[in-house]
Image: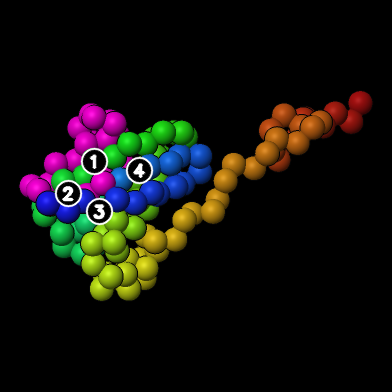
Amino acid sequence: MQNFDAVGRRKNAVARVRLTPGTGKRMINDVQMKKYLKRETLEMMVEQPLQTVGLGERFDVHVNVCGGGLSGQAGAIRHGISRALVDYDENLKPQLKSRGFLTRDPRMVERKKSGRPKARKRFQFSKR
């Protein structure tokens, strides 16, 4: 029985993904995916790479994820699953790459600047 391991990243989240041949179980930090992610949109996001290549029910997915919030973690899991699928079969790479699943999303939170309440927001201007 062969495992396919990969690491996915998004924002401050890091996901270590392991794909094993199985029946389609999804476990994130030893909790079922539906209980862990809580939102259908995030579940769909995680499932996208497997549905794109049509291997959804052939693999069990076990994930250890830490850092960031739920949205960043879901993105990291998607990235990790995509990389693990390429490890499983190199011929899946063009399909996944064209959808953008293999590219690490470089967007990060903009830092807060001094003299402002947030990164870009200004304090209210008072003429008098």
Instruction: Give coordinates of residue 5: x percent, y percent.
Output: 29, 50
Q: Is the residue under label 2 in contact with that under label 4 (CB below 8 Å)?
A: no
Identity of the residue furthest to the left in this view: 23
Mark closer to the chain start, 1 or 4: 4
Label 3 sits on what residue type?
Answer: Phe
Query: How far apart in space, not on screen, are marks 1 and 4 (Cα)?
Result: 8 Å
Magenta segment boundaries in residue numbering: 18-45
Q: In the figure, is residue 40 to the left or right of 79?
A: left
- The residue where tag 1 is placed is 62
Residue plotted at (39% across, 61% down): 102
- CA separation in Å, label 3 and label 4: 11 Å
Residue 4, numbered label:
3
> Pointer 4: what residue?
16
Colour convention: rainbow
89 drawn magenta: no
* Residue 105 in the figure: left or right of residue 1: right
Q: CA distance from mark 1 to mark 3?
A: 10 Å
Could you tell me how far apart the alpha carbons at marks 1 and 2 are, in whole angstroms? Answer: 8 Å
Residue at mark 4 to residue at mark 2: CA–CA distance? 13 Å
